[in-house]
Amino acid sequence: MKLLFVVADDWYFLSHRLPLALAVLREGFDVAVATRVGNHGQEIVDAGFRLIPLEHLKRERRSPLNEIRAIAELRAIYRKENPDIVHHVALKPVLYGSIAALGLPDLKIINAFAGLGYLASSNSPKAIILRTGIWNTLRFLLNRPNAFTILQNFEDRDFAVDTFGLSNDNTEVIMGSGVDLDVFRPSPQPAGIPIVMLPSRLLWNKGVREFVAAAELLKSTGVHARFVLVGNTDEGSPSAIPRAQLAEWNDSGSIEWWGKMSNMEQVLTQASVICLPSYREGIPKVLIEAAACSRPIVTTDVPGCRDVVQHYVNGMLVPPQNTDVLALTIKVLLDNPELRKRLGEAGRKIASHFSQDVVVEKTLNRYNHLANHSPVHL
C-alpha cells in the first residue's frame, strides 16, 4: 500500500505528522512525503521516508503562472508515484492537490484541514473575495468520488457540511495531531517572577496584538510578571507579523521575544500561564502540549480553543479581540497560585483525550477503510 503525504513545508510535516507517518511505516505502507524542502529534508529521509521536493507549492503569494505550475507539478507526481492514498494536509495542499487529482479515478484522497485559518477568521475585503472563490471550488472538489475530509473540531465539520455540501458519511473529526504524553510531562509551577507565554506562529490572527496590549496594560498597573512570545513569524501567511514589529516590541520592553524554540517540552514548563488569544483554530497543538505539562491556559472562546480548554476547569476562556478582558483574566491567574495549580492539574487529565496514540489510531483506521473499498469511477 503506497501513501503519499502532501504538505506545504518540511518543518510542518515533522511537527504535526511525523508520529502518524512513522506508525504507517510500521504498518508496512510505502510512505513518501511531497513537500517544499527547507532545512529539514534530511531529517525526513533519515526517518525512513522517500522525500519528493516540491518547487512550486508555496504558501507565499506568487504569480498565477506559478500556481498553475504547482498544480501541474503535483499532477506529475501523482501519475509517477501512482499512490493508493494521497493525504493532503492544510488548505493549499487540499485545494491544489485536489485539482491535480482530477481525472485520476483510482486515487483515493484524504483532505485534512488543520483549521480554517485566515480565510474563515478575517473579514478584510481580500479575505472575503478569496474565500468566495475558494469555498465554491472546494464545494466541487471535496464532493468528488473517493475523497474524504478530516476536520479537527466539530464546529469546523458543521461549517464544512453547511458550506461545502459535505455529508457526515464523508467527513470525520480527528482532534488535532495529538500530544506525546511521555514527552510532555506535568511539572510544578516554576519559582520566581511568573512568566505569561504565548507560544505560536506569530500571526495577527493568533491574537498577538491583543497579548502585547494586555502585557502593556498590566505592566502599567504595576503587575510584576514577564510576558514572552515564543515562535517566529510565518512569511507564508497573509497574517504574518513583520519581524521589525516583533523586534520593536522586544526592544521596548513590552514583551520578550524568544524566537523559535525546538525543545517545547522544556520551554512550556518555564511558564506560569500559557496564553493563546487566537481568532479561530483547528485544534491548537500548543494548547494540548501546555495542558499535558499541567499549565493553566488563557485562550479565546472560539472553535478549536474551546475544544481544549474548559472554562474554570483547566483554564479560562475570554472573548476574542478584547484586550481588557484578556488582561483582567491573566491578572486573576497571576494573583492566584492555587487556582493556577488546580487548573494545571485538570489540564493534564484533559490532555489524555488528545493523546498522539488516539489520533494515530483513528487515522490508521481511516486509511485501512479507504484501502479496503474499491474506488468509485464516474
Image: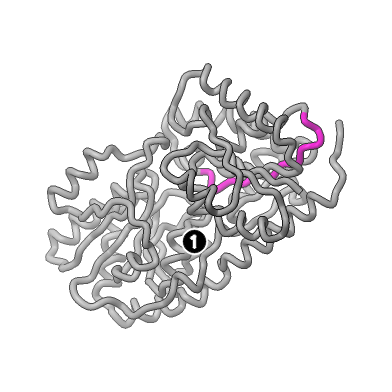
Establish if 58 lies above or below 279.
above
User: Can see residue 228?
Assistant: yes
Q: Which of 71 and 201 is in front in this view?
A: 71
Residue found at x 19% / y 75%? 192
Q: Where is residue 344 in the image (x, y as percent from the top left)?
A: 40, 76
Q: Which of 322 and 310 is in front in this view?
A: 310
111 is within the stretch colored magenta: yes
369 vs 177, left or right, is right
Question: Mainly helix, strand or loop, the magenta region?
Answer: loop
* Residue type at tag 1: Arg
Residue found at x 22% / y 38%? 244
Establish if 91 lies above or below 214.
above
Work out which quarter of the rendered image holds the C terminus and state it: top right
Q: Where is residue 86 in the image (x, y as percent from the top left)?
A: 69, 42
Q: Name the residue under label 1.
A: 306
Instruction: Kindly state the secondary structure of the residue where label 1 is placed.
Output: helix
Q: Where is residue 257 in the image (x, y as percent from the top left)?
A: 24, 52
Q: Nearer the viewer, residue 166 or 147?
A: 147
371 vs 354, left or right, is right
337 vs 46, left or right, is left
154 vs 170, left or right, is left
User: Can see residue 111?
Assistant: no
Q: Nearer the viewer, residue 208 or 58?
A: 58
Residue found at x 67% / y 28%? 75
Residue found at x 31% / y 65%? 329
Q: Give the range drawn in magenta.
A: 104-116
Question: How is colour applied across the structure in the image?
Answer: one colour
Q: How crowded is mark 1: few (under 14 residues within 10 Å), some or many (20 or more)?
A: many
